[in-house]
Amino acid sequence: MTPTLAPPVRELVLIGGGHSHVQVLKRLAMAPPPGIRTTVIARESHTPYSGMLPGHIAGHYTFDQIHIDLGPLAQAAGARFIADEVSGLDPDGQTIQLLDHPDFRYDVVSINCGATPGFSGVEIDTGVVPVKPIGRFLPHWNAIRTSSESRLRSGESVHIAIVGGGAGGVELALAVHFVLGGIGDLRVTLATASERLLAGHNQRVQTHFEQLFASRGIRVERNFDVRRVAGGRLESTTDESIDADEVFWVTGVEAPEWPRRSGLAVNEQGFILVDDFLRSTSHDTVFSTGDVAGVTDQLRPKSGVFAVRQGPALADNLIRTLEGRRLRRFRAQTRFLSLISEGGRVATASRGDWFATGAWVWRWKDWIDRRFMRRFQELPDMVTAAPTVAPALQDDLPDSMRCGGCGSKLGADMLTRVLRKLPTTAHPDVDVGIGDDAALLKGNGSQIVISVDSFRSMIDDPYLFGRIATHHSLNDIFAMGAQPVAALAIVTVQLMAEQLMEDDLYLLMRGAVDVLNEQGVALAGGHSSEGAETSLGFAVTGSLVDKPMTKGGLRDGDVLLLTKPLGTGVLLAANMVGKARSQCIAAAVNCMDQSNAKAAQIIRAHGAAGCTDVTGFGLLGHLGEMLRAAKLSARLDVSAIPHLQGALELFDAGEASSLQANNEQIFADCRFEGCSPTESRVRVLADPQTAGGLLAGVDAAGADACLRALLDAGFSAAAIGKIDVRDDQHQAYLQLLG
């Protein structure tokens, strides 16, 4: 008998993507423990490495070089990734409260989410940019850098103040001066409550940096204990003041409020108290590391070096706890090496009384930092080996990695051949049947619209998958101009321990019900089962009082409007194998989680008669259905068709949905002018969409007003082409114009 993997029976949740947790994920990727399912919950999908931040500010590193993309790393570890912020914890009930998701249950939880800026005792009005969390700082810095460069080049002066005389503040001051100081009249002031810079370092290091600051004209305000910041004005407890255009805050960190509110044991500063096993001193199923934690009897400064050292021990103890084995103690080092950047490609090394400086130190630091990051950025290709069969059978094997969502639909040609063979029965009450978005039945006073959709999960987040699957199932009803009334659910939950199956079923259906409630649709029942993978769909019934919008309703001269960008198919396919950027996936998820209800109302109000939703057969496949039904042709402006961030780059890299090749058969019906079917911007037109937008024909006189209304309603809509009477002399009825 072929051995099978053990189904999950315990839930491990990692809160935050800090320096410890990325090492836990790497450990799980190398040796996944049977029976354990891991979920990562983090506010941001990209984890910055704080040691490389000054180099990024100075222009030595790109965004990608200093960040770990948690999505592919979680994929490699077999973990789920959920993008959200934690607002609370119930350690007794073992649930996590999130801002944008229902409560999340765990068996063991680890907290490595960092801390908050240290504003205690300071009155903050406006004008402060905290450097932590780094993910929120960088957009501010990019905007400030752009505006400062513009002002400096125009002859204006710019004054930037930095609060904090530790290594972070010193490195930031030098990096800002390095990148902006040569442009114009830049003034940089560093304010510290201490007598000297780098108070925790030896005197030689302090003297070196004080001399360095003096040589570069960076002003240092010592013994400046900030009590108030308002509009760029810093006021000290001794009534001194500094006026600046921008204020960066780089002091020590404070604990977030939610661990204390949650009932976890915390120290006087509010940091989670953990023992030598990195386990909460009050709750055995809670672990914590990094800035948010305080190890009992191991007082250490808040530095990323300790979170890095804690990672391997944390990974070991999390697995041991879940497997019921004895834990191992962790002991933090008392002395550690500090490598401090000086703006340019020069750095200083400090450890105890030892001190060294020079370009060679920067190269050493650069080598250490890049080596650390490579462990989490250079992941092995995630491919599943095809079964071994005779060589003569190899060509007929399906791809081993099959898409979820609409990328998992059967091909149009296969479906058409089967439907032709079926001995279907007509009924006088069915006005519209196979071939349109939904079936249309005669009713008393109104028409009844019925549709069904179902597919397997294409994202890790069960709540968001529930929302997206529901949007998708309602879209056929909206595309016909009808109002959905009731839905029957069809759900399959992956076979796991009963508690985990219950957790997933709740999250799936909670996402679904939230969308149904938003649209006033009743969940009227359904069917559930267990299986090899999770899937969700709905049979939806709606009502229609007006004439329906149909696929055959296009008219000569109509302007084609598309309400959402394309690209979900290739993005989701690439995500399955860890090749898509998490930021691009997040944008695709947001797009799929947008209802088409308002778009359908706007299109209908502007006189559209022909409409469909763009799903598994791609834009061209569904437009082809409309043109054949209406016996018309279309000219598309390829450059006007919107696409999601990262989609074209993935096509260029060789990625595609498993349905792509089948969908591209529509190219045989196309005539290309100024573009080619091998171009990514053309291939995306055959990309299968999940919860895609509406494609409608609107009379040219009202098309501009309709498009403006769609844009005002928050849709990334575009006018993409025009409908013509078909010229029978042309074999192609789709013209794609570059």
Image (spheres, rainbow, N blue to C red):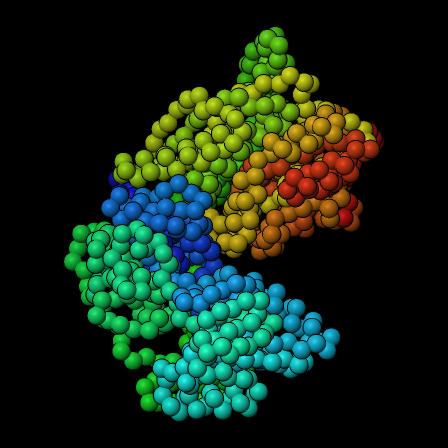
Residue 10 visible in the shown view: no
Q: Residue furthest front?
A: 239
Look at the image and tell me in which quarter the N terminus lies: top left
**From where the camera sits, is residue 701 visible?**
yes
Left or right: 426 with respect to 370?
right
The residue lying at 57 percent from left, 80 percent from top is 188
The residue positioned 35% from the left and 49% from the top of the image is 88
From the viewer's perspective, is 109 left or right of 345?
Answer: left
Horizontal and vertical percent position of residue 468: 50, 37
Tell me the residue at 37%/27% (across/down). Answer: 528
Q: Position of residue 587 (x, y in %)?
A: 55, 49
- Which is nearer the eye, 74 or 94? 94
Q: Is residue 360 above or below residue 473?
A: below
Front-most of 197 and 659? 197
Residue 454, position in %: x, y?
48, 30
Give left or right: position of 390 versus 449: left
Name above or below for residue 439 compared with residue 582: above
Q: Quadrant of residue 305?
A: bottom left
Residue 115 vs 703, above or below: the answer is below
Q: Residue at x 46, y 83 (%)?
A: 222
